[in-house]
């Protein structure tokens, strides 16, 4: 199958940079000197972490941040993982890498406007509020998909619009704030 050959070739090419760097990394003499610094840095990180979880406000913010990252990762990677199957349902199974490329470009075309909207809203909206908007919009999109699935599951255009709405919700609000909000919540020694 031509598609499998293309996929294997791309995976092999992706491994090439690591293969080229591996001998140099194994022969690096500075690594042994740096290992003492790494041990000290690890001890510093552990002491900062212990301090952070002993302060209730930081501990609660850390728990909230971890929960938001976890929820965001579930739907972001879940959608990303199943996008090829969803695109096959909409467009039919493709025969080549070029066709898959254009289907993916088309399906992620809404992510750039979503990210721009998030950045634009940061000027007037607090980070937490924008994050709530992002999670709320994602919940609404998934609720509409769940409720309306039986009515639109045979309509390719409706399925594609749903996919675009999901992709937009992936990059709107929560995608931006999940990375920015921790820098606003935590002191520098906890962030690092």
Image: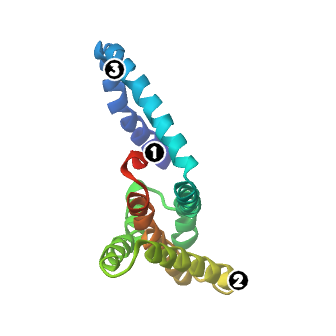
Q: Please, what secondary structure does the residue beneath circle 2 have? A: helix
Residue 150, disc:
2
Q: Assess disc 3: are there few (<14), some (14-19) or many (≥20) residues with their C-alpha within 10 Å of its C-alpha.
A: few
* Residue depicted at x 59% and y 77%: 139
Q: Give the mark, 3 or 1, whose residue is nearer the N terminus.
A: 1
Residue 166 in the image, given as x and y percentages of width and height:
51, 73
Front-most of 183 and 25?
183
Mark 1 burial class by Cα count in 10 Å: few <14, some 14-19, many 20+: few
Q: Dots 3 and 2: beta carbons under 8 Å? A: no
**What residue would you read off at disc 3?**
34
State the SS at label 3.
helix
Callout 3 touching callout 1 (CB < 8 Å): no
Give me the residue at 40% from left, 53% from top. 187
Q: Which disc number belongs to residue 7?
A: 1
Q: Nearer the viewer, residue 108 or 65?
A: 65
Q: How many marks?
A: 3
How far across and down, in percent of the image, does residue 28 sit? 30, 15
Spatial separation of the CA atoms under disc 2 and disc 1:
34 Å
Residue depth check, mark 3 versus mark 1: number of the one nearer the observer? 3
Q: Earlier in the sequence, mark 2 or mark 1?
A: 1
Please identify, in this view, whether the residue under mark 3 or under mark 2 is nearer the observer: 3
Distance between the alpha carbons at the discs numbered 3 and 1? 38 Å
């Amino acid at each position: 199958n031509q598609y499998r050959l293309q996929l294997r070739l791309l995976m092999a090419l992706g491994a090439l940079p690591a293969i080229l760097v591996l001998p140099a990394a194994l022969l690096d003499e500075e690594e042994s000197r740096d290992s003492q610094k790494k041990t000290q840095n690890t001890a510093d990180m552990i002491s900062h972490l212990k301090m952070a979880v002993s302060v209730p406000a930081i501990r609660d913010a850390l728990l909230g941040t971890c929960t938001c990252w976890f929820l965001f990762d579930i739907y972001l990677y879940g959608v990303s993982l199943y996008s090829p199957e969803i695109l096959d349902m909409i467009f039919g199974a493709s025969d080549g890498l070029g066709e898959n490329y254009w289907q993916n470009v088309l399906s992620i075309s809404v992510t750039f406007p979503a990210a721009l909207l998030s950045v634009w809203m940061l000027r007037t909206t607090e980070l937490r509020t924008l994050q709530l908007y992002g999670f709320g919009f994602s919940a609404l999109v998934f609720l509409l998909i769940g409720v309306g699935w039986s009515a639109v599951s045979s309509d390719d255009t409706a399925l594609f619009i749903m996919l675009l709405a999901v992709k937009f919700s992936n990059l709107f609000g929560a995608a931006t704030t999940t990375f920015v909000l921790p820098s606003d919540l935590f002191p520098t020694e906890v962030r690092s």
